[in-house]
Amino acid sequence: MTYDFCRFYFLLKLTIWLLGELWLGLYIIIMNRLKTLVRILFLIVIMIGCKNKKNKNVNNQKEIVESKEKIFSELEIAKYTISAIMDQPPEIITVKEKDEIYYVSYIREADKKKFDYKIKISDNRVTWGNVNGRWRETKFDEKIKHFEINNRLKIIQTFYDGSEIVKEFNKSKKEVI
């Protein structure tokens, strides 16, 4: 009887230990699967967010439909670009063109200080710089584009972090919208 009891006790302990190991194994498997599931869900959320951002950009691009006929001259585009960048009224800005580079200047009303800039226009891209300085065209400089929509000129500054400043100018009234 002692032998049977010892054998029973040993088998009981072995069974409890095996069940414990089995539960522990199942717990580890379930937790690993949950971790994998959480990672997959995280990636799906990120992908959906990126897809929505791309769709938003596509929608913005669809919104910008350029007219075939150019309403604004490149002189005006240069003028309104500096007006947008420097937040100055376009009325105080003068523009001269030499060798496809536009030289833009204005005198600030507040302190009568004169500012001079240079502008290059290529398709709908605008590059600018101080007259005696560098062109602002590194990856860290803002990217500037212009679009004509009806009688309006839209100047879009896109910064390194993806943020944007958009200013619109009306052709007929020559004012900021």
Image (cartoon, rainbow, N blue to C red):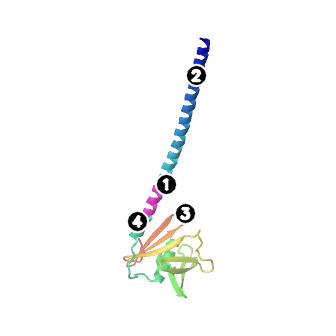
The magenta-colored residue range is 45-56
Q: Please indicate, yes or no, whether residue 88 appears anywhere in the rendered image.
A: no
Few, some or many residues within 10 Å of mark 3 (<14, 14–19, 20+): few
Q: In the rendered image, which quarter contains the C terminus?
A: bottom left
Q: Which residue lies under the disc numbered 1? A: 46
Any magenta on residue 121? no
Q: Earlier in the sequence, mark 3 or mark 4?
A: 4
Few, some or many residues within 10 Å of mark 1 (<14, 14–19, 20+): few
Q: Earlier in the sequence, mark 1 or mark 2?
A: 2
Q: Which residue lies under the disc numbered 2? A: 11
Disc 1 secondary structure class: helix
Q: In front: mark 1 or mark 4?
A: 1
- The image quadrant of residue 14 is top right
Q: Which residue lies under the disc numbered 3? A: 161
Report x, y in % for residue 113: 58, 76
The amino acid sitting under disc 1 is Ile
Q: Earlier in the sequence, mark 2 or mark 3?
A: 2
